[in-house]
Amino acid sequence: KGLEQQLSTQITAADMARVLSAVSDQLAAFDVSQTAAEDTQDDLLDAYVAAMRIEGRSEKTIARYTYLIGRMMESVKVNTRSITVYHLRQYLASEKARGISDRTLESNRQVYNAYFNWLFREKLIDDNPVANLGAIKCAKKIKAVFSEADIERMKFCCKTIRDRAILAFMLSTGCRISEMCQLNRDDVDLNTMECRVLGKGNKERIVFLDQVAAMLLREYLAQRTDDSPALFVGRLTNRLSPNGVRKMLSVISESSTVERVHPHKFRRTLATSLIRHGMPIQEVAAILGHDKLDTTMQYVIMDKTDVKNAYRRYASERASGKHAKRRSCGTPLLRWKEAMNNVHGKGRCGAARPPESGREEQGRNHPGDDRLLPRLALRVRRVWPGLHAGPAQPIRRIQAGSCRGDSRCLPCAERESGGLRRL
């Protein structure tokens, strides 16, 4: 009807009938149905952004996801519902050709996977194209930490008390740069040397200051004359921004000749120092604000010297056979226990056993020194606690040559055990 109304003022009714008949003949072989217009890419991305806000994602995360997804969609120039794994592979290959690292590409792949997986769960697409895109392997490099000399050189090159306080604060707390810049004066308790930090995902945790950091913070706050609630401020008494901290660290790096000075390196230095001094990995994760221990292990840098010394120590013990000797004497000890429990029969000394009465009144000159028996039994119980279930039996001296396998005869016990004196 719309076409007929548009052409009614231009052609006659007879011509209109002929045109409609020709169009009807051409469309006879097709199934024609009315469908709604497809959602645009911006509509799908806006729906995903709204879902992330409802889930409580931070604005920085939302901005990063929006930028990466939008940049990818502009590059592939394909509708969201038509994207396949081949489009994504070609795009990632072009990014790698531009010099993007594998770690960055893997991070971007995880963003695309989250986006398309959400569209698939919401039944906005038929399949997740990232499901067939394998994870990108990244080279595992040993990341350096600050040495004691590096820390002292950086402290020496700090121009103001504020810079020294920031360095000491990051070294003692291991806070992220965004967490430190958001702190207020009320969040720090210099008496208890504790600080309340709001980390990723709005998770609050407590970090601790050492005595040097608390002293420098007290001096820095005492000389301030502004009324800003921020813990650290810039030149115009405004809250110090993360970019301001990075610029400060860049200046310190140039003047101190310490390479690669960045905020995250302070977190790795703290984690490595705490682990090296014996703190459990679970407590280190709580200080750094990690939910998974695998994340904390990426921060811990094992010193090559510590690993080398540990290897030398354990390799020397293995070569000397200390552990092998201790394990190999299990069978002789079992034989010794059997000999200790055998109080009947003829002893290995070859003498007949005297009558039960008067055994203690007979001679006290047995060839063996029975003073070793208490210490020998004690050492056996320490190495093999389950070897003696009941209490120790009293030690009684026996006349030489009259033991007949008695449990208190040390020479017989030693011969049964194959020489237990080695323990």
Image (spheres, rainbow, N blue to C red):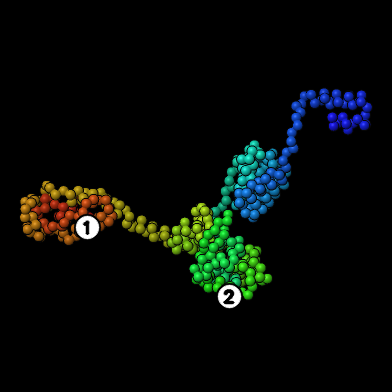
Q: Amino acid at mark 1?
A: Leu
Q: Is disc 1 placed on a helix, strand or loop?
A: helix
Q: Choose mark 1 or mark 2, whichever is in front.
A: 2
Side (left or right) of 210 relative to 47: left
Against 378, is 225 above or below? Answer: below
Crowd rating for badge 1 (residues with CA inside 10 Å; few <14, some 14–19, many 20+): some
User: Does residue 87 show up?
Assistant: yes
Residue 399 lies in quadrant: bottom left
Comparing 83 with 349, the one in front is 83
- List x then y, in percent, for residue 411: 16, 55
- Residue 376 badge: 1
Side (left or right) of 267 relative to 228: left
Q: Residue at x 92, y 32 (%)?
A: 9
Alpha carbons under labels 1 and 2: distance apart? 68 Å
Comparing 42 with 360, the one in front is 42
Against 115, is 58 above or below? Answer: below
Q: Can you identify the residue that label 2 sits on?
A: 222
User: Does residue 348 show up?
Assistant: no
